[in-house]
Image (spheres, rainbow, N blue to C red):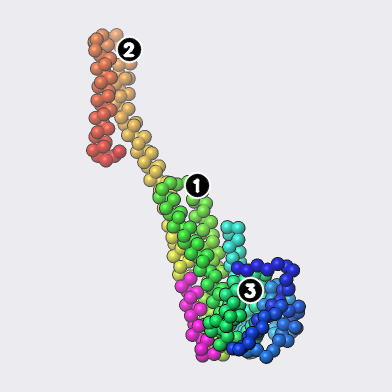
């Protein structure tokens, strides 16, 4: 993720053809849209506060702009006669947690407009590829740029999911070695992250399906196979998340099973100790009744004999328990 300072302009433009390239910061939407003479023009707006200005400048319907303005809007695709609008979410890791950011993407002719909630995105590899003329971007039109942007957003989910997987593997090893309450807290934190990612990504299935079925006229025959791959890629990511959700539930079960096993071990040891002391307690209780006529009380070797008897009983019971594999 690249972060820019507030002092920099909020609007940037990348315009390119096969043999030429332009990168510029614009002071207004009108100046950004006035750039011509290139096969593709990509305008990036780092704030949603300019959506009304965009609507007026492009003459687009107000529904996409209202959708972008809703904080809890789901990912969706809107198909209009001469343009496409997509609402998606970028996800970032911040301060040990996850943050979701709305993003609107507009495709109209050779123009691609990305509208971000805050400065910073995951598109630096795309920009660098355009600048250097590497890859397929300079050889295709705006529809392929749209695919590249969508693919970058989906690909950005993968490192987060891989980090969650590595954390669960670490927790599984910790549970098997030692159990503490902090582990359960971390497991619940991971479960929340998985649900957060699933709620973010799942609507993309329907959005990309609609993009394939209803937005096909906006894509060339060369780009359509890449759009089909987006749907499959999202499906694969969701399958991984579903596996992680099941694993997280299994970790909770493993945690409580481990605690139960350790508790059972403690109870078993205490039971063995109590069982050993039952006959010893009987003997000491028998000779502690202080009856007047108890012959053993006047026997010279009575005390050491009783101690030896008690020791023999304890050792014998321990050996029996060991043979039965109870200890």
**Start and end of the magenta stretch?**
220-237
Q: Earlier in the sequence, mark 1 or mark 3?
A: 3
Q: Earlier in the sequence, mark 2 or mark 1?
A: 1
Q: CA distance from mark 3 to mark 2?
A: 90 Å
Q: Answer whether residue 132 is magenta in the image.
A: no
Question: Residue at horizontal 70%, vertical 85%?
Answer: 60
Q: Would you place residue 283 above or below residue 150 in this image?
A: above
Position of 320 with respect to 160 (left or right) is left
Question: Residue at horizontal 66%, vertical 83%?
Answer: 22
Mark 2 vs mark 1: in front = 1
How many marks do you count on the picture? 3
Q: Is residue 59 visible?
A: no
Q: Would you place residue 267 above or below residue 189 in this image?
A: above
Q: Is residue 37 visible?
A: yes
Question: Residue at horizontal 38%, vertical 39%?
Answer: 266
Q: Which residue is mark 1?
A: 181
Please name the predominant secondary structure of the magenta segment in the image: helix
For label 2, count other residues whose C-alpha is less than 10 Å away and answer few (under 14), some (14-19) or many (20+).
few
Question: Which numbered dot is residue 290?
Answer: 2
Tell me where residue 95 sits by quadrant: bottom right
Tell me where residue 17 sits by quadrant: bottom right
Q: Describe the element under mark 3 as helix, strand or loop.
A: strand
Question: Which numbered dot is residue 103?
Answer: 3
Position of 109 with respect to 179 (left or right) is right
- Classify the position of the C terminus by image quarter: top left
Percent across and percent down for residue 80 are 63, 87
């Amino acid at each position: 993720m690249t972060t820019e300072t507030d002092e920099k302009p909020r609007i940037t433009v990348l315009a390119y053809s096969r043999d030429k390239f332009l990168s510029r910061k614009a002071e207004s939407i009108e100046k950004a849209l006035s750039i011509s003479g290139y096969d593709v023009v990509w305008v990036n707006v780092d704030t949603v506060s300019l959506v009304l200005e965009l609507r007026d400048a492009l003459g687009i319907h107000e529904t996409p702009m209202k959708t972008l303005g809703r904080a809890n809007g789901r990912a969706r695709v809107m198909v209009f006669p001469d343009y496409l609008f997509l609402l998606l979410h970028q996800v970032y890791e911040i301060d040990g947690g996850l943050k979701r950011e709305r993003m609107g993407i507009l495709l109209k002719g050779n123009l691609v407009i990305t509208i971000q909630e805050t400065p910073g995105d995951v598109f630096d590899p795309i920009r660098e590829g355009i600048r250097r003329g590497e890859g397929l971007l300079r050889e295709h039109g705006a529809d392929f740029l749209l695919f590249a942007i969508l693919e970058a957003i989906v690909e950005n989910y993968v490192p987060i999911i891989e980090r969650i997987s590595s954390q669960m593997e670490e927790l599984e090893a910790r549970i098997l070695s030692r159990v503490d309450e902090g582990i359960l807290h971390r497991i619940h934190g991971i479960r929340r992250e998985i649900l957060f990612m699933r709620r973010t990504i799942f609507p993309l299935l329907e959005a990309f399906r609609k993009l394939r079925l209803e937005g096909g006229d906006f894509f060339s025959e060369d780009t359509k196979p890449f759009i089909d791959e987006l749907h499959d890629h999202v499906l694969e990511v969701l399958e991984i998340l579903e596996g992680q959700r099941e694993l997280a539930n299994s970790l909770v079960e493993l945690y409580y099973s481990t605690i139960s096993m350790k508790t059972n071990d403690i109870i078993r040891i205490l039971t063995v100790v109590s069982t050993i002391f039952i006959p010893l307690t009987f003997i000491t209780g028998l000779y502690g009744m202080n009856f007047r006529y108890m012959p053993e009380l006047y026997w010279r070797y009575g005390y050491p004999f009783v101690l030896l008897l008690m020791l023999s009983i304890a050792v014998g019971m321990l050996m029996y328990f060991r043979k039965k594999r109870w200890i």
